[in-house]
Image (tube, grey):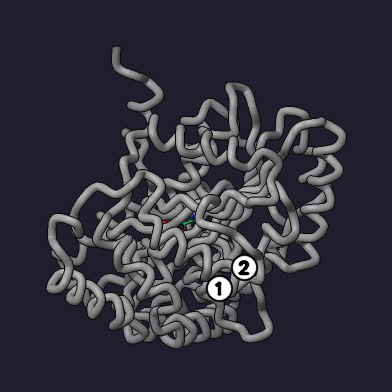
Amino acid sequence: MLSDTMRSFGKNACIIREISAYGAARSAQIGAENVFDFSIGNPNLPAPPAVRETLVRLLTEMDPVALHAYTPAVGLPAVRQAVAGYITETYDFPVTMDSLYITEGASTALAMVFHAVCQEGDEVILFAPYFTEYPVFVRAAGAKSVDVPCTEPDFQIDFNAFQAALSDKTAAVVVNSPNNPSGVVLEEATLRRLCAILQEKEREVGHPIYLISDEPYRDLVYDEDVTVPYLPAYYDDTFVCYSYSKNLSIPGERLGYLLVSPRMRDWQEVFAACAGAARTMGYICTSSLFQHLLPACLTERVDLTVYRTNRDLLYGALTEYGFTVAKPSGAFYLFVKSPEPDAFAFYEKAKSREILLVPSDDFGYPGYVRVSYCVDTDKIRRALPGFKALAESYGL
Ligand SMILES: Cc1ncc(COP(=O)(O)O)c(C=O)c1O
């Protein structure tokens, strides 16, 4: 029998992809240069040259049978070893390859963890605004997501709301910093407080409450005085879901990892549950070619100066025009308060000026729009008069 749940997930597709598809169709009609599509978080920068050079070397020098073979489900030992060395050195947090599962990006890592640590009826706390797919992954794992809206205007954690949401059913809490869709980085003091509350709650309820750190934007930070604390060092029951999609500009290649903190009680059992979850979801292994590439590219990054320029340009202009914008330190998004309560109405008005934004309802936080600035800087410059006219139309 057809699954109603799966059918509804498939039919109610992510709004971002819908808007982006509209952008492509509209570009075909009136020319791409006339459409200002800020909808999708698809990096516009080329991968660092080392990615291409390594691919060429692998394709010319390596035995093709070995290069394209299935790998162990957890990933190639040499690759896990290299990632473990990178984490140990970069974050001063010792891990071995036994804690690492090489995944198809952060999405797979997240889905594996939810399936591994949730039982029917469990709850997962999401700090809103959040990545649109979290509730889908949580529900697919049989759990229920509980939204906790952030504080304004700093977009940190609302601890009163958080403590009210915690219960003996809470299996996990997800943090994402730098954040999609706000670009905000959570402060160290905020994270310390979060971890202290979780430790106390774990003692009270007598079971682990896992902290899931979703980190596709960890390395996309533009302010020198901003750091992204490494959560496994603060809280033992932590998972890290990392992705190379954005920092290497290879989102279509599907590469990331799941770290199960070795400080977690029974971490080998937890790791086994994550591996079991991957197995049930049909993940055999991620791209062998890109696994082989990774050790040579671990310290490579896209040209962050372009994103920084875009951030400064757009944030500066939109605030000057009178829009209220969350202060973005990382990722490549701005979260802009809709000048009218209905963000869809604002989205439609922007659309009538060929500016495509994403209304924030699907991020669990109505009343805003997300602007993805991983687009050509020139396009941003040419979109500014449209943003200005929009602001004026609201009397900002
Ligand atoms: C917050 C967040 N988490 C996870 C993902 C999934 O990324 P990946 O390509 O690594 O699966 C994204 C992608 O945009 C994201 O923004």
Query: Relative to 154, is 255 on the left or the right?
Result: left
Crowd band around label 2 with a 10 angstrom C-alpha radius: few (<14), some (14–19), many (20+): many
Quarter of the figure with the N terminus: top left
**Quarter residue 3 falls in:** top left
**Residue drawn at (68%, 68%), measured in percent from left and top?**
229
- Marks 2 and 1: in contact by CB < 8 Å? yes
**Mark 1 or mark 2, earlier in chain:** 2
The disc at residue 330 is 1
The disc at residue 184 is 2
The answer to whether residue 389 is above or below residue 191 is below
Label 1 within 8 A of ligand 1 by Cβ: no
Picture coordinates of residue 290 (x, y %)?
A: 29, 62
- The answer to whether one can see residue 195 in this image is yes
**Quarter residue 243 falls in:** bottom left
What count of labels does the image hold?
2
| Amino acid type, residue under disc 2 in the picture | Val
**Residue drawn at (55%, 73%), measured in percent from left and top?**
330
Label 2: which secondary element = loop
**Quarter residue 289 falls in:** bottom left
The answer to whether residue 140 is above or below residue 222 is above
**Residue drawn at (41%, 79%), measured in percent from left and top?**
300
